[in-house]
Image: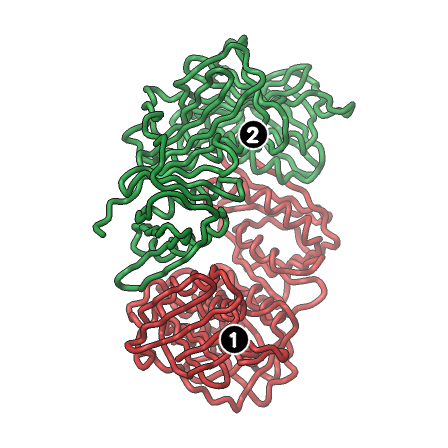
Chain colours: A green, B red
Amino acid sequence: MKLTVTKQELNESIQHVSKAISSRTTIPILSGIKMDVSHQGMTLTASDTDISIQSFIATEKDGKTIVEVHQPGSVVLPAKFFVEIIKKLPADEVEIEVSEQFHTLIRSGKSEINMNGLDPEEYPLLPKLEENQILSVPSDLLKSMIRQTIFSVSQNESTPILTGVQWQLSKGKLKLVSTDRHRLASREVEIEKHGDLEFKNVVISGKNLNELNKILPDQNVMIDMVVAESQVLFKLNHLLFYTRILDGVYPDTSKIIPSGFKTEMVIHTKSFMNAVDRAYLLSREEKTNIVKLMAQGNGVVEISSSLTELGKITEEVEAISYQGEPLKISFNSKYMLDALKVTDSEKIHIGFTGAMSPIVIQPEDHVQLLHLILPYRTTN
Amino acid sequence: MKLTVTKQELNESIQHVSKAISSRTTIPILSGIKMDVSHQGMTLTASDTDISIQSFIATEKDGKTIVEVHQPGSVVLPAKFFVEIIKKLPADEVEIEVSEQFHTLIRSGKSEINMNGLDPEEYPLLPKLEENQILSVPSDLLKSMIRQTIFSVSQNESTPILTGVQWQLSKGKLKLVSTDRHRLASREVEIEKHGDLEFKNVVISGKNLNELNKILPDQNVMIDMVVAESQVLFKLNHLLFYTRILDGVYPDTSKIIPSGFKTEMVIHTKSFMNAVDRAYLLSREEKTNIVKLMAQGNGVVEISSSLTELGKITEEVEAISYQGEPLKISFNSKYMLDALKVTDSEKIHIGFTGAMSPIVIQPEDHVQLLHLILPYRTTN
């Protein structure tokens, strides 16, 4: 194997695939990045068995030579050092040559690096997924759907299925749901291009979606999603992101969401969020994060928090509209802030069905995003 | 006590003094910030006994009212919550009122905070230092002197005196020296305004200097330095920074610095630093950081590092000038990088007196900055 490649493109690809490298792998070959070089270009692969990422660098881009292949071949190089050294090489071009026993020579300017490569035959093969059913979603939309749901996955490994986000596709609507039993986040969108595809128990771990979000671009480019039995593949130009589907059945959360409210209000997101944030500052000193919300029915909402040792904070926010019974409810202010932070809407609608029933937070202008928070049982 | 103060000025002062708050204090009153309000303005004080910081806010600034004092008085408020809540208050003005038993009411916009204040009489008094001997140093110069020496203080608490930087003033020259026995950093400047002041055993802990550097402005404003028996006071406008002087006698380091060299070279700082940095990336994989430097006398300097498991990296850098014997020496590349990073000079002079003697790094154009690194004993 012998090639010359531009440092910038090589570095970009390495940065992408390196997201799949785990520092705690028990399979030695997976601490490396696999390089496959053909006359079409070079493919980099990294995997921790849970996530696999593959990036392809074509020999030409916009009429410019990116990879000059002198001799095709494959090698696996130790990831950690490889990732860091490529970034810092002195010249714009990098020469890579593999000789017997996978000894690899990397040259750039006056830098010369000899690396002990590993046998690419030992590297596990990526799953072959049937690609006849494809779902296409714009990258920026996918990113924001993930951001709006990922924070409420469970951190508790004793119920592994809840550490993931549930993906459902039915009648052209893609819905993401996550819950840690104390709160729930749900985001739905209509998808134009979906074929006849339907699924409802595709659960992807929050950790993996976090890595996916790092490599999804913010632009409006289409991401193809291939859903197989135990794997989902996200395809973006020359980048493939494979993730395992979590085992188990995701609980039916549709019945938890209240349909009618005893009290409803519309309120400015920012002023409500800032008031909750200040009350949170006090509440977290005792790690309970408990904040109390009271409303008399005149549209003035009082948010307060108190700690015996430190003192008390009281905030007043004027609701834009208020309907229904007076209100007295306590909740985890951290959960409320998490939900408000991902609600990209100037005004929000909050619905209450009683001091012990879930609080429902939605943007005022649409219902495709929904956050649900269980209140705290407090004594007064 | 009752006053109104602009949020911005109050917040700035709080941010400054809060640098002295330790989360692990054993003296309860020191977990608070003391406020003293007189008709001249308000003074904030924080201390962890090692460092004390005091900030004064005058009633007027540039003809604008900053503090409106309705009733003078004092109180101590729990620092952590106070620091964070003031930053996030909704209005530009903050009203603070202390009633009996130091109950404190803070109001801003629709936010109302009741805090349990503490008795200011319990707060320790700051030392009174005699200010007849003052040294004046420009803030930006002081910052850079600290930055150039602080990194080589010892992290080993078993020799406390070496965890500090030694400050010496003799014949109008201020010199800072630090060493952890493996390397030494020294920076000297001529001071215009110093009176007859001389000292040589003023040792200030690196930790404290780090906090000082955070509040020193980057501009060329004068900092007055008052040196007393066990304390040093840095004065900047309305800000006072007190630090304890470390007990013990700093070792005499003047004899360690070689006076003549067997090999000398001048080299471009950046290309040398980048080459060492790449070799460091490999060397740190085994935590030794050992990098080898070889020169045959033709001006080409070879920097290399090798690990049995991973491979080898070889770099070549052309020296601008080279005099003396061929060279083969090993050193800790992290120490070399630390020294090079704070050398704000395009070219450096490196002097060697043998494979077992200290390496001396200085800017090519002046000798006021000096870094010394002890080489590694290696078998080949």
Q: Name the residue tied to disc 1.
A: B167
* Location of the N terminus of chain A (image quadrant): top right
Q: Residue at x 34, y 36 (%)?
A: A155
Instruction: Give the image quarter of residue B64.
Output: bottom right
Observer-nearest of B167 and A355: A355
Q: Residue at x 53, y 54 (%)?
A: B335
Dot 1 and dot 2 within a common chain: no
Query: Residue A70: x and y, percent?
Result: 70, 18
Q: Please tell me whether residue A240 is drawn above or below residue B255 in the rendered image.
A: above
> Which chain's residue wears label 2?
A
Q: CA distance from mark 1 to mark 2?
A: 58 Å
Circle nearer the viewer, 1 or 2: 2
Query: Residue A310: x and y, percent?
Result: 31, 64
Q: Which mark is residue A141?
A: 2
Instruction: Give the image quarter of residue B354.
Output: bottom right
> Which chain's residue wears label 1?
B
Observer-nearest of A213 and A17: A213
What is the three-letter code of the residue carrying label 1?
Trp
* Residue B180 appears in view: no
Q: Secondary structure at mark 2?
A: helix
